[in-house]
Image: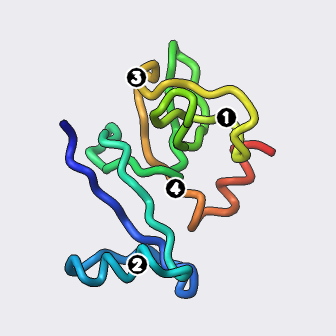
């Protein structure tokens, strides 16, 4: 079983912060100021942990694309989406040959625009 890890997006300060102790974590969950972002349980080609909302450069069968990691309720797991609104095609992470984290939906608006409408 994988270890469940989170990072926290601070909406007001527009940056990620870490949780120092359990008491602070409880305050984060109850607050509108933060967004909890879960690790998907894998790392990219450089050993960087992959999180929900990460923008990745992925290869599959010799084709390269920018995709967004998001939770999918139907498959009960994380998928890589071709568009930022989750309307288009999505691919199982296990079907990708390589994954490289190149940004995330919180900090990289310009990169997000390149992913799709």
- Observer-side mark, 4 or 3, equals 3
Residue at the spot x=53%, y=52% of the render? 53
Work out how far the residue at label 2 is from the one at label 4, CA to CA, in angstroms: 23 Å
Residue 87 place in picture, x, y as percent: 75, 36
As helix, strand or loop, the secondary structure at mark 1 comes to loop
Residue at the spot x=60%, y=38% of the render? 66
Work out how far the residue at label 1 is from the one at label 3, CA to CA, in angstroms: 16 Å
Residue at the spot of label 2: 28
Which tag, 1 or 3, sits closer to the chain's start? 1
Residue at the spot x=34%, y=61% of the render? 6
- Badge count: 4
Residue 38 place in picture, x, y as percent: 39, 54
Closer-to-camera residue (111/50): 50
Residue at the spot of label 3: 94
Work out how far the residue at label 3 is from the one at label 2, CA to CA, in angstroms: 31 Å
Query: For the residue carrying disc 1, how many other residues have a C-alpha within 10 Å: few (<14), some (14-19), or many (20+)?
Result: many
Which tag, 2 or 1, sits closer to the chain's start? 2
Residue at the spot of label 1: 82
Residue at the spot of label 4: 103
Q: Are marks 4 and 3 in contact (CB under 8 Å)?
A: no
- Observer-side mark, 2 or 1, equals 2
Which tag, 2 or 4, sits closer to the chain's start? 2
């Amino acid at each position: 079983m994988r270890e469940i890890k989170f990072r926290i997006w601070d909406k007001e300060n527009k940056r990620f912060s870490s949780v120092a102790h359990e008491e602070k974590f409880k305050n984060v969950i109850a607050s509108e100021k933060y967004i909890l972002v879960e690790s998907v349980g894998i790392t990219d080609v450089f050993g960087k942990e992959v999180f929900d909302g990460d923008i990745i450069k992925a290869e599959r069968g010799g084709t390269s694309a920018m995709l967004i990691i998001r939770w999918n309720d139907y498959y009960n797991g994380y998928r890589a989406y071709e568009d930022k609104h989750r309307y288009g095609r999505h691919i199982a992470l296990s079907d990708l040959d390589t994954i490289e984290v190149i940004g995330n939906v919180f900090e990289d608006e310009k990169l997000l625009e390149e992913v799709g409408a």
